[in-house]
Image: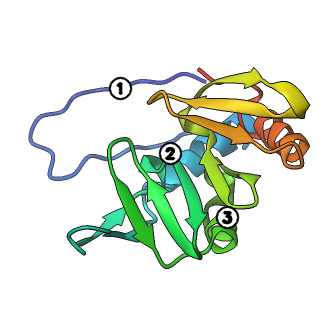
């Protein structure tokens, strides 16, 4: 896939156009990723109670703790009313996959994978955080990686 990036002064809003001849896997992934920036989820700061719209592409991972769903971004943490399954139903085709009963990860923020004992896998995120892929979710996780990113974590 050829990618051209241009700077244009004086734009009122940034925009992206995706041209394709046929909708192959690579194009479908690019389309889903780009569309993720048009859908938002509301997050609430736990300390200040301030709310903001969060783009799915900003989210590194989600975790359920004490029946509350938290969104973890590069340098902040937000609470949302969404459930993990509800989030996956809405954004699952945009790089999100369950890695345990209480956690969903954005595969576009994974830097590397390391195999551990007991068939567990550690997903090391681009910010250095380490998440464990539970062994019962391992096969589905790898299948999602193969179909979504073709195993390329760069």
User: In what element is the residue under mark 1?
Assistant: loop
User: In what element is the residue under mark 2?
Assistant: loop
Vertical placement of 7 versus 73: above or below?
above
Image coordinates of residue 100 in percent, x first then y, are 75, 53
Check disc 3: other Cα within 10 Å, few if <14, some if 14-19, many if 20+: some
* Quadrant of the image occupied by residue 89: bottom right
- Give the Cα separation between the discs numbered 2 and 3: 14 Å
Quadrant where the C terminus is found in the figure? top right
Image coordinates of residue 37 in percent, x first then y, are 43, 54
- Identify the residue position indicated by label 3 in the image: 88
Q: Is residue 20 in sight in this rendering? A: no
Residue 125 is tagged as none
- Left or right of residue 14: residue 113: right
Image coordinates of residue 54 in percent, x first then y, are 37, 61
Vertical placement of 102 versus 149: above or below?
below
- Left or right of residue 47: residue 118: right
- Give the Cα separation between the discs numbered 1 and 3: 31 Å
User: In what element is the residue under mark 3?
Assistant: helix
Image coordinates of residue 59 in percent, x first then y, are 47, 50
Residues marked 1 and 3 touching at CB (< 8 Å): no
């Amino acid at each position: 896939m050829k990618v051209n990036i241009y700077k244009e002064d004086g734009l009122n809003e940034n925009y992206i156009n995706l041209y394709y001849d046929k909708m192959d896997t690579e194009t479908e992934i690019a389309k889903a990723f780009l569309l993720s920036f048009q859908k938002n989820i509301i997050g609430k700061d736990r300390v200040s109670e301030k709310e903001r719209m969060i783009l799915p592409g900003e989210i590194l991972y989600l975790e359920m703790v004490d029946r509350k769903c938290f969104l973890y971004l590069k340098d902040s943490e937000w609470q949302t009313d969404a459930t993990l399954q509800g989030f996956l139903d809405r954004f699952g085709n945009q790089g999100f996959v369950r890695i345990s009963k209480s956690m969903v990860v954005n595969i576009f923020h994974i830097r590397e994978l390391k195999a551990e004992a007991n068939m567990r896998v550690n997903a090391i995120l681009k910010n250095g955080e380490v998440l464990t892929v539970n062994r019962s979710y391992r096969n589905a996780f790898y299948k999602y990686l193969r179909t979504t990113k073709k195993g390329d974590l760069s």
